[in-house]
Amino acid sequence: MAGPGKPGPIFWYKEGNLVTLSVSPPFWHPAFSQGFILDWDGVLAETKLNFAPIREKYFGGEFVPLLEAAQSLPPERREDLNRDIYDLEMAGAETAEAVPGAFELLNWLEEGQKPWCVVSRNCRDSIHLAAARCGLPLPTVVKSRDEPPVKPEPEALWSAAIALGVPFEKCLMVGDFLYDLVGARRAGMRAVLVQRPRAEWKHWADVSFDRLTDFVASLKAPEPLVPWEYASLAEEKGREKLAERAGHRVLLSGKDPLILPKALSLAERGILLFALEDGGPLSAEQWKNMPAIPPSLLDQPLVPVLQSLLSFRYPLAEIADGADGRPSLREGEGLDRLLGKIP
């Protein structure tokens, strides 16, 4: 039976026939995320902030990230900028309104016992004032720019995941701006974009919803979605081929000096289940053939090293038990045929 955070079967009708779909790898849906990290302004509260006059005043109208660009200003000028940002946010909070669907989203989280928090680039005072004006409840964990680092720095989201007690790869970032999406990508988290139907940076999100109410409706009736890392592969090969590849387990040799780049290459092409033969510690040769990993992993057990390497880029991939009954393939003709190298 499906439970909180556990994917289950989805039933729907196609041409009069009952079809069963499973929201399981290689497919995904935000409803089964274990921790929810929500942006504040534009996602839960609408304050209609317009930073264009401030950018014009301090940066000649250039579209720069204000908090980061402030570091380039002289100390006195930086203080003036921070004061102007604070005043604008507080003025917006005075007239804040709940985003349509915000209460429904929080009710869904509460009913599903989903841990959630707020991570915002706004100041803490404006968040609390806007929440009071809107009647929106705030969670125990609220991270504002007063508690750096801030999005899109991944540490901002990792610290939120730690506070929720949820592994970062099981968390979902819900936002309405580029920094939310880039921050999620940097942190190895899923990302949902809401309230920005014409955004040019939708491609950073796993899925986007024109309105928050559409997102809530999808949470209540989840269907299999292709995650961000497999969007181009599904477009090229089709969802059925993606599902076929994900249904096979590939056996890797722990003695192979190229095991790490091979696993990443296979995961990139839709292989999500791996089993390890002759697993041992990470050898010096294996480490040298994967320059991106730190030397501190030398001589560490290969299974967790491989799982950690896969998690950031391909969070659905896992090192599986070799006795789970799934079809198993080794390198060679069977695997080549599955990947389309052999007609």
Image (spheres, rainbow, N blue to C red):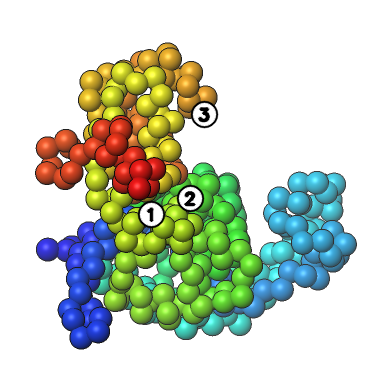
Amino acid type at mark 1: Cys
**Marks 1,2: beta carbons within 8 A:** yes
Q: Quadrant of residue 31?
A: bottom left
Q: Does 335 sit above or below residue 129?
A: above
**Residue in the picture at 45% in, 47% down:** 188
Q: Considering the numbered disc 2 on the image, is that residue within a helix, a strand or a loop?
A: helix
Q: Earlier in the sequence, mark 2 or mark 3?
A: 2
**Residue in the picture at 11% in, 44% down:** 325
- Quarter of the figure that contains the N terminus: bottom left
Distance, label 1 to label 3, CA atoms, is: 24 Å
Residue 8 placed where, x, y %? 20, 64
Amino acid type at mark 3: Ala
Seen in the image, is 59 located left or right of residue 125?
right
Distance, label 2 to label 3, CA atoms, is: 22 Å
Residue 332 visible in rendering: yes
10 Å neighbourhood of mark 1: few (<14), some, or many (≥20)?
many
**Residue in the picture at 23% in, 64% down:** 22
Seen in the image, is 172 located left or right of residue 194?
left
Q: Quadrant of residue 9?
A: bottom left
Q: Which residue is mark 1?
A: 171
**Nearest-to-viewer mark from 1 and 2:** 1
Q: Which residue is mark 2?
A: 157
Q: Earlier in the sequence, mark 1 or mark 3?
A: 1
Closer-to-camera residue (31/102): 31
Residue 36 placed where, x, y %? 39, 60
Amino acid type at mark 2: Leu
Q: Considering the numbered disc 3 on the image, is that residue within a helix, a strand or a loop?
A: loop
Q: Which residue is mark 3?
A: 292
Seen in the image, is 254 located left or right of residue 90?
left
